[in-house]
Amino acid sequence: MSITVISVLCGITGMIGWGVYDFLGGVYAKQIGPFKSLFWSQLAGLISTILLLFLFATGFEVSAQTFWLLLIAGILYSAGYLFFFRGFEIGNVSTVAAAMNLWPVFTMTIAFFFMGQRLSSLQTLGVFMILTGVTFASINWKGRMKNNYQLASGVRETVIGAFFFGVYWNISEIISEEIGWLSTTILTKFLIILFLLLFSNLVKREIDLANTAKKTKYIVVLMGIIEAGAVTIVNYGLTIGDAILITPIASALSVVTIFLAIIFLKDKITTLQGLGITSAIAGIIVTAF
């Protein structure tokens, strides 16, 4: 199998896995709250990722600098998903998923100013398409006749989450180059769980699922396994394939999330929001070139 085919398959797998995870996260954030959805799904993901140690040999030798970067990465990832799931809890799943497409823009901006990386002309066009698309998708256009434009519900929280994710992926890239993709994934998820436990005690946030239906528990666990699988396959693909193909394909996960929301949740979007969503997704793909 050629490297190109492997890259495409890994990218598509990541896109589907993350898209399904975000869709289920949006559904169950409304039912049991964003904190419980995130904590238990990430715990299930951590356990399933640890099982990979039986298949792949890896080490956990971490320098002092990498240790602090891991701590920051765990906090950023946790905060990103807490804000993202909060957006799902109060907003329209399709609109929130489109707004989350901003995270690659934040990643590229940080890489440009702080890591010396540069964009091609087409990538610059892609960033512009993402920004334009998110703007159209995120505004509540029902108030346009009253000159009362407002952000759609959940968008403000989602943009904050996108910023955290954007910073996270820059840091994660540095860590992965230092200790490898599996060690990075396991240690980051462990720190995510630790941070969420500390956060729950600090703000007195309930995480018990004792009164939750068994079906919900099973699906939250399934969410975590799916998300961990997506991370694993994409990271594995990056070690043998072409990142320039894998990353933009996987980043188009909102295609899956929005499609599922329209089919199963009957989400309603305006024509302009639909055009915005399309532009944001197309922009992500264009950034690959």
Image: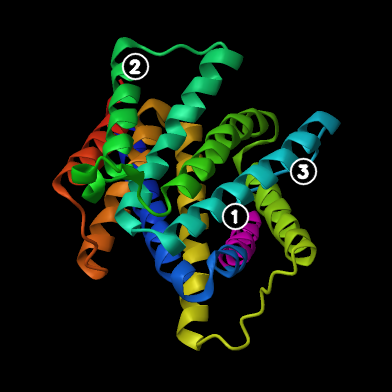
Location of mark 2 (residue): 124
- Give the CA distance from mark 2 to mark 1: 40 Å
Q: Residue furthest left?
A: 271
Q: Which residues are magenta?
A: 41-54
Instruction: Specify whether residue 1 is painted magenta.
Output: no
Q: Quadrant of residue 244?
A: top left
Q: Looking at the image, which residue is at 42% across and 57% down?
A: 22
- In the image: residue 36, left or right of residue 132: right
Q: Main secondary structure of the magenta part?
A: helix
The residue mark sitting in front, 2 or 3, is 2
Mark 2 Cα shell of 10 Å, populated few (<14), some (14-19), many (≥20):
some
The alpha-carbon separation of the residues under discs 2 and 3 comes to 38 Å
Residue density around tag 1, few if under 14, some if 14–19, many if 20 or more, within 10 Å? few
Q: Sort mark 3 into few (<14), some (14-19) or many (20+) by Cα contacts within 10 Å.
A: few
Q: Quadrant of residue 129?
A: top left
Question: Where residue 28 sits in the image (x, y, percent)?
Answer: 45, 71
Mark 3 belongs to which amino acid?
Phe
**Badge 2 amino acid:** Thr
Horizontal side of 261 relative to 52 (left or right) equals left
Quadrant (top left/top right/bottom left/bottom right) for the N terminus: top left
The Cα–Cα distance between marks 1 and 3, rounded to whole angstroms, is 16 Å
The residue beneath circle 3 is 60
Q: Earlier in the sequence, mark 2 or mark 3?
A: 3
Q: Which residue is mark 1?
A: 55
